[in-house]
């Protein structure tokens, strides 16, 4: 990194500094170890930011890779250096918890294209000394998994005991089983799909357009030009957050209740509690996430379609797999409804794979996999314990 690059990083907000100098562990890959991207270009050099929890056993058979969702990061079970809050799966990962770190060695990495230390659009491009911005090639889920495989190799692990993740993380889980079928003993894709639906793509496009319409976006060069497209990114987050909830949960939590008033204000302030809630979600999001990364992450999920490489036959993607699958859906999730999970189960059955499936009854919507949902936690614990016995870990 040049002196000018270092000086630029020093002037950035905490979140943007984390993109280049993360507080977590970092694996560096040089020019001689390029990451081949689906876009037809090599990314080199690059880095992967990650955390680990628990201890790797002697024969390296107890490693679990945890894959994060759209706006997640490597701090799955530790305090975020940006928000100061517990990790997004702290309720699930830890000693005695469903992903038991007294039993398993857990790896959690930030994906390629992210903004928490793995190379992404906010990272400094060594060729220019400035953030990549939109000069970074478009990233796919398969690219994310290739990079994760390189990290797993770097850690000296041949076969992962399990790969676990929800939403975009679940897409990574599925891609792992297709790209590296002999390296995954058990797979737990949660609240996800084998491809992104046209409805989901539509919501993502609304969010991207909101970001790019913000005058402070500056064609993606906002970091160099000293601006931040806060308003556009906040609106994108608000629109996306609606898809993570359910009508029942919204009615239960907010209904048509007014916010700090007894009558309509007859203006455009936040009259309703739900309006205030969404504005809060948007405002807090811009302090921890990079706008260009949001474009890259949403585009990666939009491109995801496992069956497309197999003549449209999803079952062929899993042909001959020896991985044990456990799928979990949530009854009120309309972003990735149960019907999409059943389609994956049917494809796995057609491929003669070992598969179990559970639909959790809840009104918490898509975000249920991130919340305190006891039955979900029981399912994760049961699946992993059963797989661990089959592998001889316990």
Image (cartoon, rainbow, N blue to C red):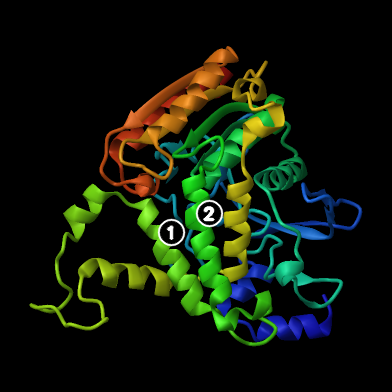
Q: Is residue 202 above or below residue 182?
A: below
Which residue is identified by label 1? 240
Which of labels 1 and 2 is toward the front? Answer: 1
**Residue at 66% across, 25% down:** 317
Question: In front: 93, or 39?
Answer: 39
Which residue is identified by label 2? 70
Q: Which mark is residue 11?
A: none
Query: In the image as oriented, which residue stretches furthest toward the right?
Result: 32
Callout 2: few (<14), some (14-19), or many (20+) C-alpha neighbours within 10 Å? some
Q: Are marks 1 and 2 in contact (CB under 8 Å)?
A: yes
Q: Is residue 5 above or below residue 278?
A: below
The quadrant of the picture occupied by the N terminus is: bottom right
- Mark before the other along the chain sequence, 1 or 2: 2
Task: Look at the numbered disc 1 and give the secondary structure of its residue.
Answer: helix
Task: Look at the numbered disc 2 and give the secondary structure of its residue.
Answer: loop
- Quadrant of the image occupied by residue 10: bottom right
Q: Is residue 126 above or below residue 185?
A: below
């Amino acid at each position: 990194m040049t002196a000018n690059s270092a000086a630029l990083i020093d002037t950035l907000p905490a979140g943007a500094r984390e993109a280049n100098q993360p507080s977590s562990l970092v694996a560096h890959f040089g020019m001689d170890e390029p990451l081949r991207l689906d876009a037809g270009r090599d990314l080199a050099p690059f880095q992967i930011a990650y955390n680990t929890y628990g201890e790797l056993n002697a024969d390296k058979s107890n490693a679990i890779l945890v894959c994060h969702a759209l706006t997640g990061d490597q701090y799955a079970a530790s305090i975020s250096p940006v928000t100061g809050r517990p990790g997004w799966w702290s309720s699930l990962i830890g000693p005695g918890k469903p992903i038991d770190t007294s039993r398993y060695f857990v790896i959690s990495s930030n994906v390629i294209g992210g903004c928490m230390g793995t190379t992404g659009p906010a990272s400094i491009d060594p060729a220019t000394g400035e953030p990549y911005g939109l000069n970074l090639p478009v990233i796919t889920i398969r690219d994310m998994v290739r990079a994760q495989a390189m990290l797993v190799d770097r850690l000296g692990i041949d076969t992962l005991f399990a790969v676990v993740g929800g939403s975009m993380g679940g897409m990574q889980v599925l891609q792992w089983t297709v790209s590296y079928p002999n390296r995954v003993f058990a797979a737990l894709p949660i609240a996800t799909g084998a491809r992104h639906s046209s409805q989901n793509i539509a919501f993502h496009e609304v969010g991207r357009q909101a970001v790019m319409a913000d005058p402070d976006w500056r064609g993606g060069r906002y970091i160099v030009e000293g601006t931040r497209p806060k308003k556009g990114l906040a609106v994108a987050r608000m629109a996306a957050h609606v898809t993570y909830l359910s009508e029942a949960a919204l009615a239960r939590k907010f209904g048509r209740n007014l916010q700090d008033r007894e009558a309509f204000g007859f203006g455009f302030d936040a009259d309703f509690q739900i309006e205030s809630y969404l504005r809060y979600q948007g405002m807090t999001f811009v302090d921890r996430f990079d706008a260009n990364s949001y474009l890259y992450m949403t585009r990666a999920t939009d491109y995801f379609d496992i069956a497309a490489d197999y003549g449209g036959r999803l079952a062929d993607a899993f042909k001959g797999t020896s991985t044990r699958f456990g799928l979990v859906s949530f009854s009120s999730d309309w972003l990735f409804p149960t019907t999409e999970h059943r389609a994956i189960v049917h494809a796995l059955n057609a491929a003669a794979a070992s598969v179990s499936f559970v639909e959790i009854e809840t009104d918490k919507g898509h975000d249920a996999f991130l919340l305190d949902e006891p039955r979900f936690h029981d399912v994760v614990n049961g699946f992993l314990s059963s797989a661990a016995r089959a592998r001889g870990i316990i």
